[in-house]
Image: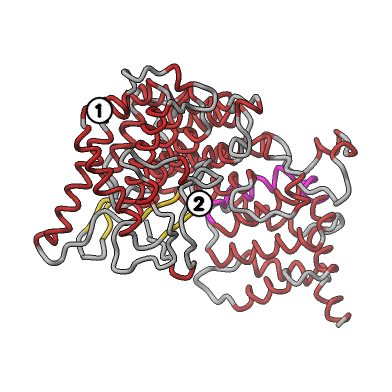
Amino acid sequence: NTRLIEYMSKKETIAEMLNILLEFDEEGNFKQAHVVAEVFSSGVEEINAALVGLDTEYILQLFDHLVANPRSLGSRKAGYIHNLLTTLVKDDEDLTLEFLNKHKDLVMKAMLAHLDQRAMAAAFKGLLFAGCYSPPGMQEEEESAENDAEGWARDLATVEAIVDKVFEGGDDNADTHSNASKLLRSLIGEGVELSEEFAQHQYLHPHVSSEDICIRLANGIFHSSPPSALSSREGAFKILTALVGSNTFRDSDSDESGVDMSEVPSIKYPCAALNHEQMCADLRGEGPQMPSSIGATIRCVGPYRMSIVKYLALVFSSESLAVTRELATHGVVDACLQLLFDYPWSSMLHVEILCIVQFIIRSYDLLMQLRVFRKFNLLTKILDFLEEEDKRNASGGGGGGHKKVLTSTNRGCLYRICLDVELYLVGLSKGNGSEDGEVDAVEASTCPIRTWAEKHKVRWQSFVIGTLRGVEERQERHLAGLPIPCPDGINIIYDAGPQSNSNASDFGLSNSMRGLGLTQSTSSDNGSPKTGDSDSGDMAWENP
């Protein structure tokens, strides 16, 4: 209807509709505002041109209103504005980018003032991605330096402004902290479906991963005065975790590629600024309470503590020995390992800590192994814990309403640690060191794992023969390739259950273990123990 479009795109009509949207009260009647939002989100070229055209720029009123009224949007109004802005970017990108470049400071102030709303954070992300876009076929070398400099929000100042929002205010500002963190992680590429064009031209990614930003994040976590809010530190750790995960250490060996992962800014600077006492205190602190399925309340790991453990698991997976030794020496690893026994019901936590222990075993590093297997005495604690849990299960918990504390996934993680230890001992007994011969430098008499196994020879062999051999025969189901930050992947082996896995491979764990442990022949090409084919429909994931 050309006459209707002509009327709706008149300056007077645009001004009246925009005024309805800006004056919309979340508690009032939303019908008119809803109709206006639908019109502005229709993608009609004439309406878009009236909103952001150089001769009209009515949308300036919108950004002026946002700057003048910070943190005043309700969720419905924020959604309307989100739809308007994303439609403009999608349907009239050139015109919108011209407007954004002309009014960058105003737009930045307006969007940053309303990061407490998820819809506004999503709209801001769309605007930033539009600024990082280059038309298909245009190569980076063909773009002029002048265009790069003038591109909408492509500079370091944009990233710094968003990082500042991560640390702004206290825990009552948690929504802003969370949305700012998600926004930066989306620029890194975490959890965002970007087109190929966007993925090839992410101008802001180098800024997010730069030394300046990593130092700012590290100082915000450990050296802020007054101390940063818990939600701020959680958001910052999640950004650092995404940065470490965006590196390619899983695809190529760091020694072969010549990349020293300890020099990566997202590892180097946070670990250098790390306050070990504060880190250990945060890991050991009391978690929040939540109701359980049996009516009682249990302690939760908490999102902040979980963000720390995920970051540390990736740091250990990066095989940065200089950094990981420092963490082990100052008790950070001990604090992580204690969580295995303090929170036996948290599956995600166990999986992350498993990655840390697996690296320490594979590293053949005497210092870290001494800390874990002699001072912390990990294997003794695991065996004691499993025995106590088996006794509780056998007695029914003494009350009929007992629910098993240790989940199947967590029991599988503890078994996995024991299997890796046994494989390590088998390698030592056969003289099979690491590929680069590092194990040859470790004297058998001083190897902490071997020393412990010899000291507790009867108990360990009894556990290996009586428990580990029967794990596969008693397991309920197989899960292979669990998606965790571990370069080699893992295979969780479940404990006894009412059903058996009828598809289990005949080449079982009991056939591969010969009193000493898991032999090399049981491993598949990717280094994980082989399992039989499982029907994916029968797999049941447990909520952590």
Q: Quadrant of residue 429?
A: top left
Residue 186, how many percent across, how many down?
A: 61, 48
Q: Residue at x 77, y 68 (%)?
A: 14
Name the residue located 30 percent from the left edge and 48 percent from the top edge: 468
* Image x and y of residue 116, in percent: 52, 53
Q: Viewer-nearest of labels 1 and 2?
A: 1
For residue 40, side relative to residue 435 (left or right): right
Q: Is residue 42 above or below residue 528?
A: below
- What's the amino acid at mark 1? Glu
Residue at position x 80%, y 64% in the image:
48
> Which residue is under mark 2?
483
Mark 1 Cα shell of 10 Å, populated few (<14), some (14-19), many (≥20): few
Magenta span of residues: 98-117
174 left or right of 152? left
State the image coordinates of residue 136 (x, y, percent, origin top left).
85, 51
Residue assigned mark 1: 454
Which one is in front, 125 or 194?
A: 194
Q: Is residue 235 magenta?
A: no
Q: Which numbered dot is residue 146?
A: none
